[in-house]
Image (cartoon, rainbow, N blue to C red):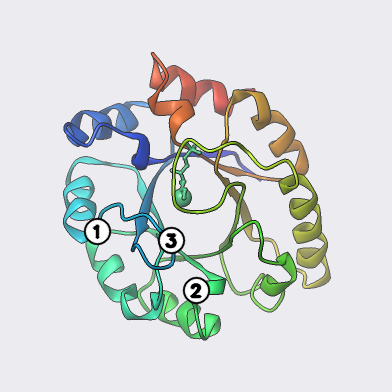
Amino acid sequence: MKRIISPSLLAADFGNLKADCEMINASEAEWLHIDVMDGSFVPNISFGFPVLEAVRKHCTKMLDVHIMIVHPEKYVKRFAEAGAGMLTFHCEAAENPQEVIDLIRTEGIQVGISVNPDIPVSMLEPYVDKVDMVLLMSVYAGYGGQKFIEETYDRIAELREIMKSRNANCMIQIDGGVNPQNAQKLYEAGVNVLVAGSSVFNSANPVEAIHQLLNV
Ligand code: DX5
Ligand code: ZN
């Protein structure tokens, strides 16, 4: 499957988001990853619809929106209206994950489903053939700049087995602690979408950092 880099806006300069959007536009990143946190599903609060709408105006790439919120079903429509091209919710945050998938489909955008590192991958089994993408968290959702959890490789292998058994061919995204040192191993494990916050935005040359992640 084709490789895609989705830089995480969480690590951008919030005082100058337009400039960072323009950097993304000029880069090889196909998507821009947007982390929405509610202070309830995760301890941290990031930003919401007004920021998303502002970014939508300046960014020409697809907005890959990762919602770390309780009651995802309540907000699907608003995220779609605010410009999400992919909406990824946490399976463990939803009372009825299939309902959330159906709501996102109704909006005509792509559907992603995610789990934190302590949630069994088997929880995703009923959904792998119903979504466009599975996001396996490689850190605990809530903060940028954390260290990549090595057990993620075993979880990717487990997910691929489940996908095979269900004849599913969704994209696999990894989020948290991704850098040029682990990107190659992740591609080899079968991942095709890499989210990268600090390793892109803290780099002296973010456009080059994106190029490197794509071409390791
Ligand atoms: C964490 C977020 C990530 C985060 C990644 O809850 O979902 O997208 O921004 O940041 P880095 O790449 O710095 O680990
Ligand atoms: Zn994320």
Q: Nearer the viewer, residue 33 or 36?
A: 36
How far apart marks 1 and 2 lie (CA) works out to 18 Å
Kindly identify which residue carries mark 3. Answer: 42
Query: Residue type at mark 2?
Result: Ala
Nearest to viewer (mark 3 / mark 1): 3
For label 3, the crowd category at 10 Å Cα-Cα, with few meaning under 14, some 14 to 19 and many 20 or more, is: some
Residue 161: image quadrant is: bottom right
Kindly identify which residue carries mark 2. Answer: 93
**Under 8 Å from ligand 1: the CB of mark 3?**
yes
Nearest to viewer (mark 2 / mark 3): 3
Give the secondary structure at mark 1.
Answer: loop
Judge whether 98 appears above or below 162 on screen: below
Give the secondary structure at mark 2.
Answer: helix
> Between disc 1 and disc 2, whose residue precedes?
1
How far apart marks 2 and 3 lie (CA) works out to 10 Å
Residue drawn at 74 percent across, 71 percent down: 122
Judge whether 37 appears above or below 184 on screen: below
**Under 8 Å from ligand 2: the CB of mark 1?**
no
Residue drawn at 66 percent across, 61 percent down: 118
Q: In the displayed structure, does residue 199 sit left or right of residue 178?
A: left
Q: In the displayed structure, does residue 9 sit left or right of residue 120?
A: left
Kindly identify which residue carries mark 1. Answer: 48
Q: Position of residue 208 (x, y in %)?
A: 45, 17
* Pointers 1 and 2 in contact (C-beta within 8 Å): no
* Pointers 3 and 1 in contact (C-beta within 8 Å): no
> Between disc 3 and disc 1, whose residue precedes?
3
Q: Position of residue 169 (x, y in %)?
A: 69, 61
Residue drawn at 56 percent across, 72 percent down: 91
